Each structure stands twice: as C-alpha cells, then as structure tokens.
C-alpha cells in the first residue's frame, strides 16, 4: 500500500515537473516572439519611411532567425534597386538638362513627364515651378507652339515643323511617337525636341541673297560687254570715235568685272580664315603707303588727304595686308564720295578708358542718309547704286573692311550727315592678338 502511494507521488511530481518546464519554455518563447514582433514592426516602419539602412537583429535562432535574414536581404535588395533607379533618374535629368535644345516628353493624355529648362523658356512657361505632371495645355503659353502641340502630340508619325515666330525667331519642332516597349502599335506618348534655328535660317538667307546678288552683279557688266562686242562685230561701218567709245565702255565694264571678282575672292578668303601670319604693323607706315597709292586720284579731284596721329609709333599685331586694305578702302571711299576740292583727314588717338586705339577717317563729302547708316556694311548695299557703279564701286568694300576690323578684335562705326560729310571710326584693342 505504502509503495503504491510512493509510486503515485512520484508520477505526480514528474507530471508537475514537465508542466512547469513546458510553462517556462512557453513564457520564454512568448517573450522572445513579442520582442521579435516589436522589433519587426519598428524596422518595417523605418523601411516604409525609406530608411533602407536599418536591419533586423539576427540573434534569434530557428525559423524566426531565418525570417530575419530573409527580411534583411529583401531590404538590402530594395535599397540597392532604389539607389540604382535614383541614380538612373539623376543621370537622365542631368542629360536632359544639359541638352542645348528644348526637350519634352508628354504622355498620351497630354501630361508632361519630363521637361528641361530650355523647353520651359521656349514655351514661355513658368521656369520656376516643376511642370512635370501638368497637362501641356496649361503650360505652353506661346499660342503658335500650342497649336502645333495640339495637332501633333500623340501622332504615330515623326513630324518636323518649322515655326516662324515673332522677332524673326524660327524654331524647328520635332515630334516623335514613343511606343510601348516591343510594340510597334501602342503609343504611350510623344517626345518633342525644339531647336532654335534662327541663326541658321539667317545665314542661309544671307547666303542665298549673296549668291543672287553676285550673279546679278556679274551679269550686268557681262551683258554690257557682250552687247557692245556684238554691235562692233555686226557693224563694219562704225566710225572711229563711236568705236573707241564702245571700246572704252567694254574696258570699263571689264575692269568692274575684275574688281568684283577680286573683292568676292577677298571676302571669301577672309571668311575661310586666311593662312597669314601675324606681324607687328606700324599704323603710320600703313597710312603713308596708302597715301602714296591714293595721292594721284585724290589730286585729280583736288582733294587733300591730311593726317593727325597722336602716336606715330603706334603699332598693332595683325595681318599687314588686311590693315592696309582697311586704310585703303576707307581713304578710297572718302575720295570717291567727296566732291572736288574736298578734304579728308585720318586721325589716330587713344581711348584709354577702353584700352583702344582709335583711327578716324573723316571727309567733307556727300554724306550718307540716316536710314542707310545701319546698312552700308552689308554686302552689295549702296546708297546710290548707279552712282557707285559709275565710280567703280562694287558695294563690297565696307563689308570687307568690317570683316577685317573684326578679325583684329576691333569694331567700325560711322557718323554722317547728308551733304556735310562722314566719319568712319575704327577701334582696335591695344592688345591685339
Ligand atoms: P562701294 O564699292 O559702292 O563704294 P562700299 O561697301 O565701300 O561699296 O560702300 C557702300 C556704300 O556706302 C557706298 O555705295 C556709298 O553709298 C556709301 N559710302 C561709303 N563710304 C562713303 C563715304 N565716305 N561717304 C559717303 N558715302 C559712303
């Protein structure tokens, strides 16, 4: 009986021991789990706040430990993926920003996905705010550009439109469809490239005008020459005086043709950049040389060519032939456009404030009308075409002169009063290169 009771007590004790052990284990597990869940909640909150550098502690063993490791790995992958996406976005934005054209990407509904600052300026829209996400209809302030966008955004074709805007500004707008990846049919938007081609159009027009002018200028003397040659050929009985008169005209027109071709070649050689070496050029020596060349023609009209050099030793670094051509063109024009008994003065002084050498070519000739002052440096521009032609002008002299002065880093301006005279002012930096 006693031994039975003892065995029963032992069994109770054993059950109690196991239950206690189990209870202790359960409490410990619950505590660990709660702590784990708390940490998990905190870390996941941080991750949702984009704090991708946080990690779960991996002290727990077993399945929770495995979960922690996997979770940490997932955060790490998310971190590096987001970093990569951000870097790519930064790269794209920097590229788009540094493109010198206006660039826009617009989705099929008209929402701006991407726009650079140049495009904002070209569209006359607000440059201060972020326009991405807005509809282009509320952003494009220029009416003409808006019309083009409305017509072509979402088009399946590649479109190129040249738009003439106010103040002679010309934009070339290229609109290309953006297809859904791997699909040739599903369009998801348009990419727009706006280029300011004002300068190109201007140069192209100038080139076209130049070719037309050159052809016209060459044609006039040639027509005259062939006309008189033809007349001489078919009329054997022309008297000597008339014959000589015709031959004089042919000679004059041939010289004009020669002068024109020489001037055109000179102009094109300056534009193509001559292969000349810089020299130390003493301006007074150049003046003396030009004086000697023009003396005969000046004295034939009883015109005096005076000089007044503040510094007769003044010299510049430049192409000697070009400097001589500048002096020659301006003195020669002075003589050409000044009636008999007139006076020309070449004056050199310094503009010390702006560190310039100034050379003025002043005459008391016919002067230039106010409305022509801006235009006389243009190629083939002449105030009085017939008169200029008559005295052997080509209309290219001042264009050549201006080019040459510019190549010295200088500038040329003119002041003139009709009937009183003209003053051409050349400024050259003291430190010419
Ligand atoms: P051109 O060969 O006709 O002289 P330029 O280019 O040298 O061509 O000059 C352009 C025009 O400017 C001339 O046709 C003339 O009308 C005007 N011009 C130039 N220099 C003078 C001047 N000193 N006085 C008056 N008019 C001038």
Image (spheres, grey):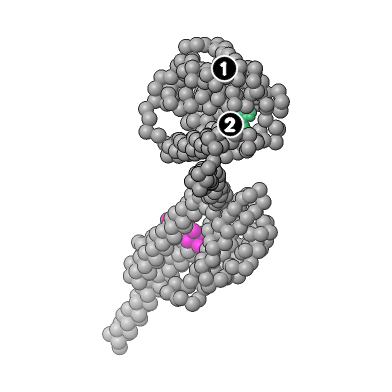
Q: Position of residue 226 (x, y in %)?
A: 50, 46
For the residue pair 418 and 52, the one nearer the viewer reads as: 418
Q: Is the residue indicated by label 2 positioned so its CB lies within 8 Å of ligand 1?
A: yes
* Mark identifier at residue 271: none
Q: Residue at x 46, y 53 (%)?
A: 95
Which image quadrant: the C terminus? top left
For the residue pair 354 and 318, the one nearer the viewer reads as: 318
Q: Position of residue 15 (x, y in %)?
A: 35, 80
Q: Residues within 10 Å of mark 1 (few under 14, many from 20)?
A: some
Q: Left of 3 or right of it: where is 233?
A: right
Q: Which residue is mark 2?
A: 391
Which image quadrant: the N terminus? bottom left
Query: Magenta segment, principal secondary structure?
Result: loop
Give the magenta part as a residue range.
47-53
Q: Residue at x 63, y 59 (%)?
A: 145
Q: Position of residue 387 (x, y in %)?
A: 63, 34
Ligand 1 resides in the quarter of the picture at: top right
Q: Which residue is mark 1?
A: 299
Residue found farthest to the left: 3
For the residue pair 83 and 419, the one nearer the viewer reads as: 419
Give the total number of marks visible in the rendering: 2
Q: Is the residue indicated by label 1 positioned so its CB lies within 8 Å of ligand 1?
A: no
Answer whether residue 430 is visible to the viewer in this image.
Answer: no
Q: Residue at x 49, y 38 (%)?
A: 254
Q: Residue at x 64, y 18 (%)?
A: 342
Q: Quadrant of residue 278?
A: top left
Q: Earlier in the sequence, mark 1 or mark 2?
A: 1
Q: Quadrant of residue 385?
A: top right
Residue found farthest to the bottom: 1
Answer whether residue 387 is visible to the viewer in this image.
Answer: yes
């Amino acid at each position: 009986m006693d031994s039975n009771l003892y065995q029963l007590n032992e069994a109770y004790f054993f059950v109690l021991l196991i239950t206690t052990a189990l209870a202790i284990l359960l409490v410990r597990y619950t505590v660990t789990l709660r702590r784990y869940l708390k940490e998990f909640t905190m870390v996941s909150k941080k991750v949702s706040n984009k704090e991708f550098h946080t990690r779960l502690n991996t002290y727990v063993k077993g399945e929770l430990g495995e979960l922690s490791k996997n979770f940490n790995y997932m955060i790490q992958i998310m971190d590096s993926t987001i970093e990569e996406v951000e870097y790519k976005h930064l790269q794209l934005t920097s590229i788009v920003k540094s493109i010198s054209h206006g660039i826009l990407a617009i989705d099929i509904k008209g929402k701006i996905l991407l726009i650079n600052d140049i495009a904002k300026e070209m569209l006359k829209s607000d440059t201060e705010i972020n326009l991405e996400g807005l509809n282009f209809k509320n952003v494009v302030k220029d009416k003409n550009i808006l019309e083009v966008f409305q017509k072509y955004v979402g088009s399946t074709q590649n479109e190129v439109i040249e738009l003439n805007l106010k103040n002679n500004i010309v934009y070339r707008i290229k609109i290309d469809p953006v297809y859904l990846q791997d699909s040739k049919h599903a369009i998801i938007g348009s990419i727009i490239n706006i280029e300011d081609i004002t300068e190109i159009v201007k140069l192209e027009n100038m080139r076209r005008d130049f070719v037309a002018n050159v052809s016209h200028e060459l044609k006039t003397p040639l027509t005259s020459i062939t006309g008189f040659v033809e007349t001489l050929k078919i009329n054997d009985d022309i008297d000597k005086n008339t014959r000589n008169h015709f031959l004089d005209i042919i000679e004059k027109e041939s010289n004009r043709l020669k002068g024109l071709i020489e001037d055109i070649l000179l102009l094109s050689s300056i534009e193509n950049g001559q292969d000349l070496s810089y020299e130390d050029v003493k301006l007074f020596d150049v003046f003396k040389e030009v004086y000697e060349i023009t003396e005969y023609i000046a004295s034939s009209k009883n015109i005096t060519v005076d000089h007044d050099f503040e510094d007769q030793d003044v010299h510049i670094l430049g192409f000697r032939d070009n400097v001589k051509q500048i002096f020659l063109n301006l003195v020669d024009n002075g003589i050409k456009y000044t009636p008999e008994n007139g006076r020309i003065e070449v004056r050199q002084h310094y503009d010390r404030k702006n560190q310039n050498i100034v050379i003025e070519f002043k005459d008391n000739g016919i002067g230039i009308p106010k409305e022509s002052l801006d235009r006389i440096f243009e190629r083939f521009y002449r105030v009085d075409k017939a008169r200029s032609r008559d005295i052997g002008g080509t209309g290219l002299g001042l264009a050549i002169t201006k080019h040459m002065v510019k190549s010295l880093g200088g500038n040329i301006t003119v002041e003139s009063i009709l009937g009183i005279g003209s003053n051409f002012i050349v400024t050259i930096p003291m430190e010419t290169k």
